[in-house]
Each structure stands twice: as structure tokens, then as C-alpha cells.
Amino acid sequence: MDDFSDVLTANAAYSASFVDEGRPGVAGRGLAVLTCMDSRISPLDVLGLRPGDAKILRNAGARVTDDVLRTLVLAHYLLGVQRVLVLAHTDCGMTKNTDADVHAKVLAQGVDSRSIEFRTIADQEATLVGDVQRIRSWPFLPPTMPVGGGVYDVRTGAVRMVVEP
């Protein structure tokens, strides 16, 4: 438990004053946001949202993976999602390495990771366009569902749309 004592102590303080507001499990504003796992990004704050407004999906590089697509199908048909924003960001570690670089760094620590596709990003805007198109063309989602893509600037806090919905 010592490995998690800091967060469990913080949770104890949080839960002591927690009030269940009775929010349903649906996306109150019909929005899903796919963004990077980078801890500098607070998606609710960045987009002026409150808990319960949106479904937040995160992974390295804000990449549209098979699991993201599976999750979006569930979010749309079961949880009220009617639009999707893919939100990449500046200064992303996934743009600073190739898959080969990552495999070499992992192998240097004694682990052969060559069976993993890390989906590093050579051209962030082109990747964002492709990932948005992957959602738009997924046959299990409505073809009319608005899907857009933007880049969050970690230095200014501004979002620049790259792919309009």
C-alpha cells in the first residue's frame, strides 16, 4: 500500500466531502474527447466542461486505435455521444520518437517490445487527419456524426482546429 499511500490519502480527503450529484453515466453534452495521456492536459478545463459533460478517452498520442473505435461505438449507442473531438497536443513525446527508437529504448532495459506497434507520429497534422477519417469511416458509427480534430498548445492553452467536423 505504500506505493499508493499518497493518492489513497488524497482520496480519503476527497471522499470525506464528496456529494453525489446524481449525474447519469451518459455524456451530458453528447461529446467524446480523445486526447493524449500527457499529464499537462486537463480535458475538462481545456474545453470548458464539467464532470459528466463528456466521455474522455486517453492514450499515448491521442491515436485512434481499435479499442478507441470499440469504445466510441459503446459511447454512441449506450452513453449519448453524438460528436467526437480528437485532440492532439504540441510537444508530444509521440512526435519525438519513431517506433524503432522506442523499441531500442525498451530493449536497452532488457525487454523485447518488437511485437508492439507504438504508433509514433512523424507528421502530427497528417496523422490527425487520418485518425479523424478512421472514425468517420468506421462502419459501426453513423456517417453523419460530427468528428473533428484539433491541436492543444501546452504553452498557451489554445486549441487550433486542424480538421473541421
Image: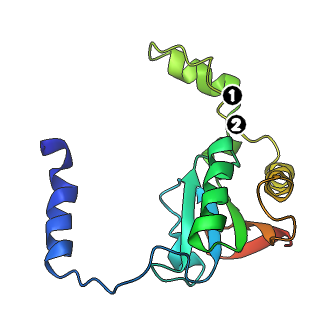
Q: Which residue is mark 2?
A: 119
- Mark nearest the camera among 1 and 2 is 2
Residue on which the image places disc 1: 99
**In the depicted structure, whether residue 44 falls above or below residue 60:** below
The answer to whether residue 69 is above or below residue 42 is above
The answer to which quarter of the image holds residue 23 is bottom left
Q: Position of residue 112 (x, y in %)?
A: 53, 13
From the viewer's perspective, is residue 72 above or below residue 15? above
Q: Nearer the viewer, residue 163 or 121?
A: 163
Q: Is residue 99 left or right of residue 40?
A: right
The mark nearer the N terminus, 1 or 2, is 1
Please state the horizontal and vertical placement of residue 55, each as a whole percent of the image.
55, 68
Name the residue type under label 1. Asp
Q: Residues within 10 Å of mark 2 (few under 14, many from 20)?
A: some
Give the spatial CA distance, label 1 vs label 2.
7 Å
Proximity of marks 1 and 2: CB atoms separated by less than 8 Å: yes
26 lies above or below 98 = below
Identified at 52% across, 15% down, the residue is: 107
Q: Which residue is at a point 77% across and 54% down the rendered structure image?
A: 140
